[in-house]
Image (spheres, helix red, strand yellow):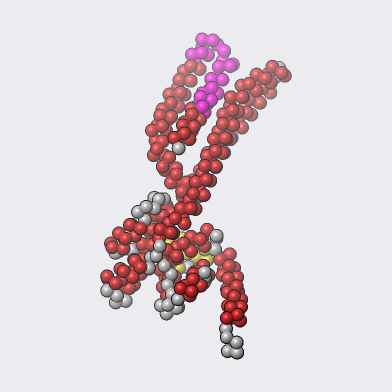
Amino acid sequence: MSITSDLLRGHTDTIILKQLLKSDSYGYEINKSIQERTRGRYELKEATLYSAFRRLEETGLISSYWGDETTGARRRYYTITGSGKKMYAKNLDDWNEAKEIIDELIKEEGK
Amino acid sequence: MNERIRAHIEGLFENAPKSNKFTELKEELLSNCNCKYDDLVAGGTPPDDAYKQVIAGIGDVSELISQLQTGQSADAELIEKGRVRSALLVSVSVGLFILSPAVYMFISYLLHRDEFAILAMFGCIAAGVGLLIYNSMTKVRYQKTDDTMIEEFREWKVQNEQSKNFRGLISSVLWPLILITYFLISFFSGAWHITWVLFIVGVLIEGIIGIIFELRKGKDK
């Protein structure tokens, strides 16, 4: 399990970029849809999520704005930028390549 | 809004610097945690369990805070650089003010043409004023783009409120005094053609006072 979460952690940025590809979103919504897609097997810690947001924003892959909710607390929305989309595509290619290589190397022969 | 969650998050940020960056982070965390809590309760989770689940999901905030703070120390370096640069600009422009009468005298002595001399002198003054304006404008830009700079500025403002008042007082006394001296000397000596130099002296004095305050501020730091 710890290997799984280490592996997943390395792809936090790509996971977030993918969530923003569909539409702008905020922290809880992103985490919730990650949880739903993995049927509850994976969930980011809030701290991990925000440190990723800050990192992505600093490198210009996403940008943020405050929503104008009329009820309750304000939400900070994130939106993916053009270079964010490019980065997502590149990361996806990289991952597919890595997955192939790892499969070749660690799968039992003849299976 | 759940008060227990708020209290817990306030506690997490107790030792964080009170800058925009952290206030926004706190607000974001609060709103997302409340969202999650409401969702869980609406889905049938008992409030106590929902609270525990939300708190467990936050993770290590202190690491996030220190990560954001290291970014801040880089900003502090930038601020320091800006301060040195602005001190340099101010000294150069004051130097130009001081030199301008000398330029006038030198050229009028050398060429015996007063109009060139005056032109050169005003050129010096204009360059000095230009530098001062450029300095203050670029300073404003720093404050707008960088929230830590704003924090720094606020702190500085509070600390220096007293000395600033004092400085304002000096210049509000200085100018009427110069004006009176100007008329007195001019009427008694009749040397109207040269007494206006007093105003340049006034600019000079103000500049020097500014530098003294700036230096003192640097020492206090």
Residue A46 falls inside the magenta stretch: no
| Residue B196 quadrant | top right
Image height check: is B74 above or below B115? Answer: below
Residue B196 falls inside the magenta stretch: yes
In the image, is B42 to the left or to the right of B64? Answer: left
In the rendered image, residue B141, in percent from the top left (x then y), is placed at 52, 45
Q: Considering the image in quadrants, where does the N terminus of chain A appear?
A: bottom left
Q: Considering the image in quadrants, where does the C terminus of chain A appear?
A: bottom right
Residue drawn at x 46%, y 73% as measured from the top left: A2
Q: Between residue B6 and residue B169, name the one nearer to us.
A: B6
The answer to whether any part of residue B208 appears in the image is yes
Q: Between residue B56 and residue B30, name the one nearer to us.
A: B56
In the image, is B34 to the left or to the right of A92? Answer: left
| Residue B35 quadrant | bottom left
| Residue A102 quadrant | bottom right
**Magenta segment main secondary structure:** helix
In the rendered image, residue A23, in percent from the top left (x then y), is placed at 49, 70
Please state the total of marks drawn on the protein image. Answer: 0
In the image, is B34 to the left or to the right of B210? Answer: left
The answer to whether any part of residue A69 appears in the image is no
Q: Between residue B126 and residue B53, name the one nearer to us.
A: B53
Residue drawn at x 57%, y 35% as measured from the top left: B89
The furthest residue to the right: B111
Residue drawn at x 66%, y 26% as measured from the top left: B120
Image height check: is B22 above or below A41? Answer: above
Residue drawn at x 32%, y 76% as measured from the top left: B43
Q: Between residue B81 and residue A68, name the one nearer to us.
A: B81
In the image, is B110 to the left or to the right of B55? Answer: right
Image height check: is B108 above or below B137? Answer: above
Which region of the structure is painted magenta? B183-208
In the rendered image, residue B192, in percent from the top left (x then y), is placed at 56, 15
